[in-house]
Image: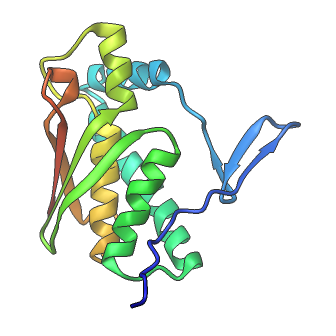
Amino acid sequence: MAIEKKTEFEIDHKFDPIKCRHFINNVCSVIHCHHFATLYTQLAMDATDFNGVKHLVTTSEAVFFDVLDQYCKQSGIISVEDKVEIAQQYWKAVGMGLICFTGIGKYEVIAEMEYSHLDEGWLKKWGGSEKPVNFITAGYVAAVAALVNDKPPGSFTAREAKSLACGDEKSEFKAVIR
């Protein structure tokens, strides 16, 4: 009986000491701090005239779609299952938390997080929220939904339905096709 090899996200981390830049798989990456992420999330929420939340979600979606799409193409990853596995491992590898995609469909994708770096920072900084705050992960879920369905970024709208920052046991994200 053959044992099927699980798809694994491979990390090639390089640091440019002259420019102080980190590169993960040749992509310039910010090694983030949850306190900083909570501050720009709050700034986006306060920027209602600018529609800051929408910009944070769509920017997250565009950036993560590009990173995941390039990685999958360069690695020859084509199956939905392998793309989902890579997306889960990538999120963990860059320190954003533990995400699990629990529903993958043509019109809807669902993800859950039992741990989130951003939510942890939010809870430490402000003690909680009345509304979900994890717009970066919402953008990520929309990116993964587009990726696994071979659609361009912007094809799905994602929102956080349950939130660790609001006191829920886990965060839940739902992306639906536009």
| Front-lying residue, 6 or 130 | 6
Q: Position of residue 129 (x, y in %)?
A: 18, 17
Compared with 116, 8 (above or below) is below
Is residue 51 visible to us here?
no
Residue drawn at x 36%, y 9% as measured from the top left: 125
Q: Is residue 128 left or right of residue 139?
A: left
In which quadrant will I find the C terminus?
bottom left
Q: Position of residue 138 (x, y in %)?
A: 27, 45
Q: Is residue 22 left or right of residue 151?
A: right
Compared with 48, 11 (above or below) is below
Residue drawn at x 16%, y 43% as measured from the top left: 172
Q: In this view, which residue lies farthest toward the right?
A: 18
Quarter-of-image position of residue 148: bottom left
Q: In this view, which residue lies farthest toward the bottom?
A: 1
Q: Position of residue 46 (x, y in %)?
A: 28, 19
Residue drawn at x 27%, y 56% as measured from the top left: 142
Q: Is residue 172 left or right of residue 151?
A: left
Compared with 173, 131 (above or below) is above
Q: Position of residue 110 (x, y in %)?
A: 17, 56
